Image (spheres, rainbow, N blue to C red):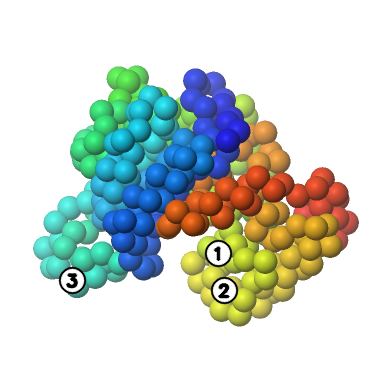
C-alpha cells in the first residue's frame, strides 16, 4: 500500500484508509464479528490509517476500533479522531439514536468546542480507543455549531494538545469547503479532512481549499458522494449528500460512467483514483463494513484507470 507524507510532519498515511463510521452502525447494524474482521482485513491488506469519531455510534465506533486494533503494533498505525461533540447521558432516552446510527438513544451529543470540552472529549476518546495518544485530531463539523467560536477556541485547544504531545497533527473535518479554507487561512492546523467536495462528481470550493492550504495536506473523504459513485451505474434512488440524488446529478453521474467505460474503467475506479491525482491529497478514507468490503475497495484502488480517461472527461466537459 503506497503512503504519502502529511506535509510539514513526520506522519505517513496509506493512500487508502479505513473510515470507521460503519463500525458505529451507520444507517444499519454492523455485527461485532464483522467489525473486527473488517479491521483485521484492512491490516492484512496494508492499510495503516484508521479514522473514527465520537459522533459515530455515540462512541461505539471508537470502542470497536480500539478493540480491533489492540492486537497490532501501535507504532505502525495512524489513528485519527475528532472533537466538538461530547457524548453525554441522555436525560430523555429514546429507543434509537436520532442521527443516523443504529444504536440505542441512551446517550446524546453535546456541541462543545471550548478548551475544557475538547480536553474532555480527547480523554474519553483515548479511553474508548485504548491508546495514550492520537496521531491526528480534527475539529468535527465546526461550521454546524458556529465556525468563528469553534475555530477560535477549538483550534487553540488542539494546538496545545499538539504542543503537549497528546496528538501529532491537528486539523478540521467538514463538508464545508468554505469552513476548511477559513481554518487553513486563520489557524496553524496541519491538515484538513474535506468531505464530499473533492470528488469525481463535484469539486465545489476545492480550489479555494487547496489555495488556502498552501503546502499543507488534505484528506479527501466522501469520495463516492454518499454512495452515488460506488457502483458502475447509479441506480434510481441513489443517495447524494445523504439525500436522494436529484435527476440532474444522476444524469451527470451516468455521463461520468459512460466515459469511464469507454476507457476500460468503472465509475468506482475513476472515483477512487481522481482525488489521489492531486499531490496535496494525502489519503482517501473509505467506509468498509465487512472484510469483503475491504477486499473490494483494495481491488479498486489497485486498478487505476489509464491516463486517457482524464483527458476524455475533460473533453466531455465533465472535469475542469
Q: Is residue 106 above or below residue 218?
A: below
Of residue 172 and residue 307, the one placed in the foreground of this image is 307
**Residue 74 screen position, x and y as percent:** 35, 28
Which secondary structure, mark 2? loop
Of residue 132 and residue 44, the one placed in the foreground of this image is 44
Sort mark 3 into few (<14), some (14-19) or many (20+) by Cα contacts within 10 Å. Answer: some
Q: Quadrant of the N terminus?
A: top right
Q: CA distance from mark 3 to mark 1?
A: 28 Å
Tell me which corner region of the image, top left, top right, bottom left or bottom right, holds residue 172.
top left
Residues at circles 2 and 1 in contact by the CB criterion of under 8 Å: yes
Of residue 13 and residue 180, the one placed in the foreground of this image is 13
**Residue 38 screen position, x and y as percent:** 41, 51
Tell me which corner region of the image, top left, top right, bottom left or bottom right, holds residue 249.
bottom right
Residue at which label 2 appears = 238
**Residue 254 screen position, x and y as percent:** 72, 70
Label ID, residue 227: 1
Residue at which label 3 appears = 94
Residue at point 80% right, 58% down? 264
Which secondary structure, mark 1? loop
Describe residue 5's horizontal placement relative to residue 306 as left or right: left
Mark nearer the N terminus (3 vs 2):
3
Sort mark 1 into few (<14), some (14-19) or many (20+) by Cα contacts within 10 Å. Answer: some
Q: Residue furthest right?
A: 315
Q: Which-is-in-front pick, marks 3 and 1? A: 1
Label ID, residue 235: none
Describe residue 256's horizontal placement relative to residue 112 as left or right: right
Residue at point 43% right, 57% down? 290
Mark nearer the N terminus (3 vs 1):
3
Sort mark 2 into few (<14), some (14-19) or many (20+) by Cα contacts within 10 Å. Answer: some
Amino acid at each position: 500500500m503506497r503512503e504519502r507524507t502529511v506535509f510539514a510532519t513526520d506522519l505517513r498515511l496509506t493512500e487508502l484508509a479505513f473510515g470507521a463510521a460503519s463500525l458505529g452502525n451507520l444507517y444499519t447494524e454492523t455485527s461485532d464479528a464483522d467489525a473486527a474482521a473488517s479491521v483485521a482485513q484492512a491490516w492484512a491488506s496494508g492499510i495503516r490509517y484508521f479514522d473514527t469519531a465520537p459522533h459515530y455510534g455515540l462512541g461505539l465506533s471508537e470502542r470497536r476500533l480500539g478493540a480491533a486494533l489492540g492486537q497490532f503494533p501501535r507504532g505502525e498505525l495512524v489513528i485519527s479522531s475528532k472533537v466538538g461533540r461530547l457524548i453525554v447521558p441522555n436525560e430523555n432516552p429514546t429507543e434509537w439514536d436520532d442521527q443516523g446510527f443504529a444504536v440505542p438513544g441512551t446517550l446524546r451529543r453535546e456541541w462543545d468546542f471550548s478548551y475544557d470540552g475538547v480536553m474532555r472529549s480527547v480523554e474519553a476518546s483515548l479511553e474508548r480507543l485504548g491508546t495514550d495518544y492520537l496521531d491526528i485530531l480534527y475539529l468535527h463539523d465546526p461550521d454546524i455549531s458556529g465556525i468563528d467560536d469553534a475555530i477560535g477556541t477549538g483550534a487553540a485547544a488542539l494546538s496545545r494538545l499538539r504542543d503537549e504531545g497528546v496528538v501529532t497533527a491537528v486539523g478540521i473535518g467538514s463538508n464545508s469547503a468554505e469552513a476548511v479554507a477559513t481554518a487553513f487561512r486563520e489557524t496553524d492546523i496541519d491538515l484538513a479532512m474535506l468531505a464530499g467536495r473533492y470528488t469525481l462528481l463535484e469539486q465545489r470550493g476545492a480550489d479555494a481549499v487547496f489555495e488556502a492550504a498552501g503546502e499543507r495536506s488534505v484528506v479527501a473523504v466522501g469520495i463516492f458522494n454518499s454512495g452515488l459513485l460506488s457502483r458502475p451505474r447509479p441506480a434510481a434512488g441513489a443517495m447524494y449528500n445523504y439525500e436522494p440524488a436529484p435527476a440532474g446529478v444522476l444524469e451527470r453521474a451516468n455521463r461520468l460512467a459512460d466515459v469511464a467505460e469507454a476507457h476500460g474503467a468503472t465509475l468506482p475506479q475513476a472515483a477512487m483514483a481522481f482525488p489521489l491525482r492531486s499531490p496535496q491529497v494525502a489519503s482517501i478514507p473509505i467506509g468498509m463494513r465487512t472484510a469483503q468490503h475491504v477486499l473490494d475497495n483494495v481491488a479498486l484502488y489497485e486498478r487505476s484507470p489509464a491516463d486517457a480517461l482524464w483527458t476524455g472527461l475533460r473533453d466531455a466537459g465533465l472535469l475542469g
